Amino acid sequence: MKDPRGRLLILLIALSVVSVVVAGAVYADLEIGYYSPENLGSITQPAPAKNHADAAYTISSFPLYTPELVPGEGRQDVEAYCNTCHSPSYITMQPPLPAATWEAEVNKMGRVFGAQIPTESQASILKYLESHYTPETRKR
Ligand code: HEC
């Protein structure tokens, strides 16, 4: 291209493209985090509650639901040893489980989770669970 006016024209076009890009970037930067007054009003909040001078508050204990285990021989052992890490609802919320499954459960509590249960108590716990929480024996 020999004509100097042609070069000038290309230079002008390039300059205008660059300035549009730069202006856009500057504008976008200014827009970040900018909230116009209309936006500010769009998050509505409830009016703050008024404190009453004569209000009385009480804090009661947290309502923990602890299901009652079926009465029977061995229940005391279950309550003593199966109650330290979780509530007995872990027993009552199971479907009726076969005796072998209960045995595996009780073994797992000791082997996997580290429950310290004397052997004779373990036997009475198993007997209790078999007598009240298997498909054949479970009433509630
Ligand atoms: C050393 C703590 C500990 C003791 C004691 C304990 N458990 Fe658990 N038990 C756990 C943990 C941990 C889980 C798993 C909890 C979870 O998955 O959210 C669990 C879960 C269970 C479950 C749900 C099924 C499962 O395998 O996750 C049953 C049923 C259960 N325990 C029964 C018993 C019985 C019966 C005893 C008494 C012999 C007992 N637990 C004593 C720690 C213990």
Image (cartoon, grey):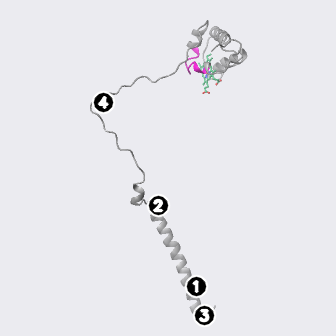
Quarter of the figure with the C terminus: top right
Q: Residue at x 48, y 72 (%)?
A: 23
Classified by dominant secondary structure, the portion drawn in magenta counts as loop
Q: Amino acid at mark 1?
A: Ile
- Local crowd size for mark 2, using a 10 Å CA cut-off: few (<14), some (14–19), many (≥20): few
- Local crowd size for mark 1, using a 10 Å CA cut-off: few (<14), some (14–19), many (≥20): few
- Give the Cα separation between the discs numbered 2 and 1: 33 Å
Q: Secondary structure at mark 2?
A: loop
Splitting the image into 4 quarters, where does residue 114 fall? Answer: top right
Judging by the rendered image, the residue that carries numbered circle 2 is 32
User: Which of the two discs, 4 and 1, sits closer to the camera?
Assistant: 4
Cβ atoms under marks 4 and 1 closer than 8 Å: no
The label shown at residue 3 is 3
Judging by the rendered image, the residue that carries numbered circle 1 is 10
Q: What x and y, as percent, mark residue 102?
A: 68, 17
| Earlier-in-chain disc, 4 versus 2 | 2
9 left or right of 40?
right
- Magenta span includes 96: no
- Give the Cα separation between the discs numbered 1 and 3: 11 Å
Cβ atoms under marks 1 and 3 closer than 8 Å: no
Camera sees residue 4: yes
Judging by the rendered image, the residue that carries numbered circle 4 is 55
Q: What x and y, as percent, mark residue 135?
A: 70, 15
Q: Amino acid at mark 3?
A: Asp
